[in-house]
Amino acid sequence: MEYLNQLLDHFGYLGIICALIGGIIGLPIPDEVLLTYVGYNVFAGKLAYLPSLLCAYLGASCGITLSFILGITLGAPFLHKFGPKLHISEVKIKRTKKLFNKFGPFLLVFGFFIPGVRHITAYLAGINNYSYKKFALFAYLGSILWCFTFITIGRILGGNWTIVATYISRYSIYLIVLFLAGILIFYTYKRKRKVLQNTSYD
C-alpha cells in the first residue's frame, strides 16, 4: 500500500484522477483499494470528501469514455490484440461479451462493481455503436455510484479500511454472482411486467 500513499502524498487530487483513468482503461491498478484508501485519507483529514469524490468521478468517467472512444475507432481487433497486455484476457472478453449481449447498458452501471468487467464494458459499447447519449446515461451513473460507495466505505471504516482489500481478493467471485443475480432478477421482472401489459392491452 506504500505506493498508494506516495501517489496521494505527491499528486493529491490529481493523482486520484490519473490513477483511475489508467485503472479503468486496464492498467494493473487496484481501483477499489485506491478508492477506499482515498476514503481513509478523508477520514484522517488529509483530503476533503467532496473534492475527492469529484476527482474520483472525473477520473473514472474520463477512463471509461476513453475506452468507449477506442471501441468506436479501433473496434474488436484492438481489444483482442492489446487486451492481454492490459491484463484483459480472452476469457474475460468472451464472458463480458455474453453478459453485455444479455444485459446491455445495465452492465455499464453494475459492471463497475465487478472486477475484470468494468474494463471491458465501455469497449463493447463502442464496438456495438452505442450512441454517446445512451452510453453516458448508464456509464456515468455507474461511475458516480461506484466512487461514492468505496470512498464512503473507506471514510466509515477509517483505520480498518484494508478490510476491503481483503474481502475483494477473497470474495470478488461472490460479488460477481450477487450483482449478476440482481441484474437477472430485475431483467426478468421487467420482461414479465412488459408481457403482462401487452396481454392486458389485447
Image (spheres, grey):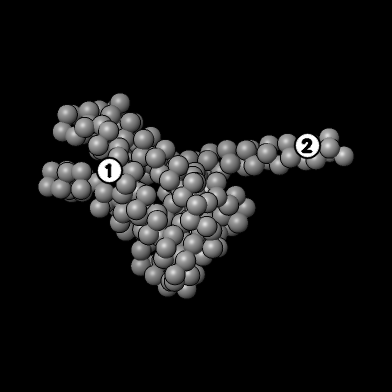
Q: Nearer the viewer, residue 188 or 169?
A: 188
Q: Would you place residue 178 above or below residue 31 in this image?
A: above
Q: Which mark is residue 55?
A: 1
Residue name at image x 30 percent, y 37 percent: 53
Residue 144 - label: none
Give the mark nearer the N terminus: 1 vs 2. Answer: 1
Q: Quadrant of residue 32?
A: top left
- Residue type indicated by callout 1: Cys
Report the residue at 26% width, 49% height from top. Answer: 17
**Other-residue count near label 2 (Cα within 10 Å), few / some / many at <14 / 14–19 / ≥20:** few
Asked whether the viewer can see residue 118, the reply is yes
Residue 6 as seen in the image, left or right of residue 164: left
Q: Amino acid at mark 2?
A: Gln
The answer to whether residue 173 shows anywhere in this view is no
What number is the disc on residue 197?
2
Residue nearer the viewer, 55 or 178: 55
Element type where label 2 sits in the image? helix
In-front residue for pair 59/9: 59
* Residue 52 location (% of width, % of height): 25, 38
Mark 1 is surrounded, within 10 Å at the Cα level, by few (under 14), some (14 to 19) or many (20 or more) other residues, namely many
Residue 84, quarter of the rendered image? bottom left
Q: Which residue, as the protein is rendered here, is positioned at the far left?
A: 10
- Report x, y in % for residue 161: 28, 33
Residue ranking furthest to the right: 202
